[in-house]
């Protein structure tokens, strides 16, 4: 599957947009408060916030450099505001008013005329006409002054090198002291009639629209809460993703909180979802519906640890809470705790109400419900609620690896029952909230944990048989730890085992391909793209790319040819007629740029790492019968449209050029205990030029590990060997084989004359090698 990691826009299409476009503002804030922003019109936006402490402060932000969009879609960077005038109407409620001491302040961060880092603090009230909660604001940047009282405290702004504008929002009871407010304070602000004039008012922004492809997008609120839904959906649509979006509602930004002993815990007081989250998701759902998308809302058993009630947490035998590796960490809710599960059901109902309110079909995913297994192998089955549920089946399981006693197996089976009961209750709540329209339920399973070969009994607890079809409508599978390591063999085996255990057919399965955690690992996208293509090859109903923030950060751009999308065959796995091909003329070609200096010396640059072969099979045509066969073969391939196999008469073996192959002929690589796929290659000469072999002859392949023959492998696409079990660390992998060359006809026309052919005039029939892998 072709893809591009785009670092910056080059010659792609752009269009002008007004600077300060409402779609591209963001919010930022400290915990525990929450805030969101939505674009409410072409020239307006609204930000909602909920405050819990006396020093809570949110920022409504415009950045001069686009930090969030895919490079093909980002707006241009322009830090010069000197000739601009920004106007908007300010309306607010529940916030510190414009005329207050701690009222809304515009912080401009950048550099002064000498290039020194500076910030200026502009009191909006100084540039307002109207009331403290409803005013027209005019900011002429060439005449802007920081300072509270003007002109006495004026601090002239240099607007020629601005990085960011940060508009502060605080509650009316703001004190700057980290003490609990008497009650949570909700507020909002609307900026409407946003306009800008002056030199540099327009910014070029990417207007790329990639063709629709077969892959879908997965994203989440915890990663996109700071951006407007319109901005996110614009990217998804422009990058070719259509039909359905899998949206994880997150584990850290949707809840309401209540204070207790200096901490804040999730609460249903006043409602289920906090107001900023609810406003954001209503806008997201409405816009998705308008653009033709369906939404799968996803809710997991994961919750930010600092806001989770202590008795809700899964715990190891010594009482340690189940904690993930995220910073700050999240915890896992106990399926045995009625309060925790009841809370999740309330959350699910709230999000279903948003789907139905937008006129969307209800599609709901229960994401990775499991009993947490710690990195050291301890399983978290020992919270008070779980211990009570186990009763006399409670035993010690200090380590999930290895075999288990009958008593331990019985306890794990009981854990699976508790987990299945909790997901059944969640599905029931979703369907009840959906009403007569019904709901499509999805189960997301993370394969590397629940199917760890070192802990075979973990499936008893984390893949209960009660999940078997038709408990859910769709089984969704994810395995990013394997994929990012290139361990596609483990994926294939686990998918087959999971399908057999739970009984979901391929057309009842979705696959999640991703994700790249750190930008320095962006080359992992190659393995992710391969995993996504494999998922569709095994007929998975949908394949989701996980997730949008990493796609945008790394510039991951999918391309899909028409043949891939509509099933047209681009290669026929047939051999060119041997008796004609044996008389072919062969040419090996490199592409080399040669520059000759004035002194006569040369500088040479080789553009290709491997030779490209071409052939002329015309000399092999000796009779009208062979000419007839050639014409029929040419028509069947539609000229150069469809490739095919060709036996190079001079080089078709791993052993020398034409000798019988042996299993030790070609070195494929060293095992590392993880990698299962090894491409077939052939080495040439002392310089060890390496040629990829993509069309081996299946029955001829012999494979060895450390010189010993092995049959624990299968031939997969494009001439790669995939082992059922990863070769151990340091094991030499070798192979021998016969192979063909993938080629196509070199021209759209095949010219031949009966008169001249009979006189010995041999037609020219060029063939050109196909490079099938990067």
Image: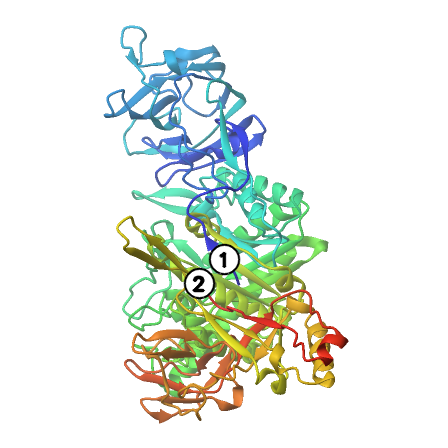
Which residue reaches farthest right?
754
The one of 303 and 127 positioned closer to us in this rendering: 127
Question: Can residue 282 be seen from the camera position used here?
Answer: yes
* Cα distance in 3D space between marks 1 and 2: 8 Å
Asked whether, in this view, residue 295 is left or right of residue 398, the answer is right
Q: Position of residue 284 (x, y in %)?
A: 57, 42
- Mark seen at residue 84: none
The secondary element bearing badge 1 is classed as: strand
Residue at the disc numbered 1:
3
Earlier residue among tags 1 and 2: 1
**Quick check: can you spot residue 169?**
no
Q: Residue furthest top?
A: 151
Question: Marks 1 and 2: CB-CB under 8 Å?
Answer: yes
Q: What residue lies at 72% left-to-right and 72% top-to-bottom?
A: 752
Q: What residue is at 63 percent from the left and 73 percent from the top?
A: 765
Image point 32% across, 20% down: which residue? Answer: 121
134 vs 691: above or below: above
Q: How is the image coloured?
A: rainbow
| Left or right of 355, for residue 370 | left
Q: Is residue 440 above or below residue 93?
A: below
Locate residue 66: give its quadrant.
top left
Q: Is residue 362 above or below residue 48?
A: below
User: Hey, which quadrant is residue 635 in on the image?
Assistant: bottom right
Residue placed most toward the observer, 264 or 105: 105
Tell me if residue 70 comes above or below residue 310 in the rendering. above
Give the image location of residue 636, x and y in percent. 71, 74
Which residue shows up at 27% across the image and 10% down it? 153
- The front one of 727 and 611 is 611
Q: Residues within 10 Å of mark 1 (few under 14, many from 20)?
A: some
Q: Name the residue tied to disc 2.
A: 526
Circle 2 SS class: helix
Classify residue 72 as left or right of residue 387. right
């Amino acid at each position: 599957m072709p893809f591009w990691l785009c670092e910056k826009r080059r010659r792609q299409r752009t269009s002008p947009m007004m600077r300060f476009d409402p779609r591209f503002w963001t919010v930022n804030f400290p915990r525990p408060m929450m805030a969101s922003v939505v674009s409410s019109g072409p020239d307006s936006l609204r930000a909602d916030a909920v405050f819990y402490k006396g020093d809570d402060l949110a920022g409504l932000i415009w950045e001069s450099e686009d930090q969030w969009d895919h490079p093909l879609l980002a707006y241009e960077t322009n830090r010069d505001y000197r000739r601009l005038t920004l106007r908007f109407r300010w309306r607010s409620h529940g916030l510190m008013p414009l005329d207050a001491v701690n009222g809304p302040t515009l912080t401009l961060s950048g550099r002064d005329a000498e290039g020194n880092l500076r910030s200026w603090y502009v009191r909006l009230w100084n540039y307002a006409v109207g009331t403290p909660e409803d005013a027209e604001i005019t900011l002429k940047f060439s005449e802007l002054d920081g300072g509270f009282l003007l002109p006495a405290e004026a601090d002239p702004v240099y607007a020629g090198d601005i990085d960011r504008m940060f508009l502060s929002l605080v509650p009316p009871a703001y004190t700057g002291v980290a003490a609990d407010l008497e009650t949570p304070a909700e507020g909002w602000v609307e900026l409407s009639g946003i306009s800008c004039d002056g030199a540099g008012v327009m910014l070029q922004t990417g207007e790329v629209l990639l063709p629709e492809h077969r892959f879908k997008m997965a994203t989440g609120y915890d990663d996109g809460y700071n951006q407007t839904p319109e901005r996110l959906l614009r990217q998804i649509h422009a990058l070719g993703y259509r039909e359905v979006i899998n949206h994880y509602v997150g584990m850290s930004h949707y809840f309401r909180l209540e204070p207790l002993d200096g901490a804040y815990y999730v609460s249903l007081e006043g409602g289920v979802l906090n107001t900023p989250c609810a406003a954001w998701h209503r806008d997201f759902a409405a816009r998705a519906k308008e653009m033709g998308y369906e939404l799968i809302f996803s809710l997991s058993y994961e919750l930010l640890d600092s806001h989770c009630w202590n008795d809700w947490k899964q715990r190891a035998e010594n009482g340690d809470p189940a904690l993930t590796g995220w910073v700050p960490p999240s915890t896992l809710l106990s399926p045995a705790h009625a309060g925790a599960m009841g809370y999740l059901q309330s959350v699910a109902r709230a999000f279903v109400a948003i789907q139905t309110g937008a006129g969307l079909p209800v599609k709901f995913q229960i994401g990775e419900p499991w009993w947490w297994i710690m990195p050291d192998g301890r399983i978290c089955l020992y919270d008070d609620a779980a211990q009570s549920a186990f009763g006399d089946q409670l035993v010690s399981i200090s380590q999930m690896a290895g075999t288990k006693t009958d008593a331990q197996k019985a306890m794990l089976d009981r854990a699976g029952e508790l987990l299945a009961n909790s997901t059944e209750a969640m599905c029931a709540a979703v369907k009840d909230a959906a009403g007569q329209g019904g709901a499509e339920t999805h189960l997301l399973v993370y394969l590397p944990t629940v199917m760890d070969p070192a802990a075979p009994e973990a499936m008893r607890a984390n893949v209960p048989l009660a999940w078997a079809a038709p408990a859910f409508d769709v089984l969704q599978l994810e395995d990013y730890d394997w994929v990012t390591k290139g361990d596609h063999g483990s994926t294939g085996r686990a998918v087959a085992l999971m399908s057999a255990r739970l009984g979901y057919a391929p057309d009842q399965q979705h696959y999640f391909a991703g994700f790249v955690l750190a930008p320095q690992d962006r080359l992992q996208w190659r393995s992710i793209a391969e995993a996504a293509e494999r998922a569709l090859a095994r007929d998975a109903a949908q394949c989701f790319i996980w997730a949008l923030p990493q796609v945008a950060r790394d510039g991951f751009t999918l391309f899909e040819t028409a043949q891939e999308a509509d099933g047209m065959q681009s290669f026929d796995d047939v051999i060119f007629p041997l008796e004609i091909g044996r008389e072919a003329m062969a040419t090996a070609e490199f592409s080399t740029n040669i520059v000759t200096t004035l002194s006569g010396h040369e500088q040479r640059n080789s553009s290709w790492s491997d030779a490209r072969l071409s052939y002329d099979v015309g000399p092999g045509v000796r009779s009208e019968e062979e000419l007839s066969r050639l014409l029929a073969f040419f028509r069947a391939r539609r000229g150069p449209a469809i490739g095919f196999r060709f036996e190079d008469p001079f080089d078709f073996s791993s052993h020398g050029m034409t000798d019988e192959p042996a299993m030790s002929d070609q070195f494929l690589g060293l095992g590392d205990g993880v990698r299962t796929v090894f491409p077939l290659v052939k080495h040439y000469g002392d310089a060890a030029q390496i040629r990829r072999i993509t069309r081996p002859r299946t029955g001829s392949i012999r494979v060895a590990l450390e010189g010993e023959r092995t049959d624990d492998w299968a031939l997969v696409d494009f001439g790669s060997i995939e082992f059922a079990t990863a070769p151990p660390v340091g094991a030499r992998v070798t192979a021998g084989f016969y192979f063909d060359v993938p080629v196509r006809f070199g021209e759209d026309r095949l010219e031949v004359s009966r008169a001249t052919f009979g006189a010995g005039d041999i037609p020219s029939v060029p063939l050109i090698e196909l490079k099938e892998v990067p």
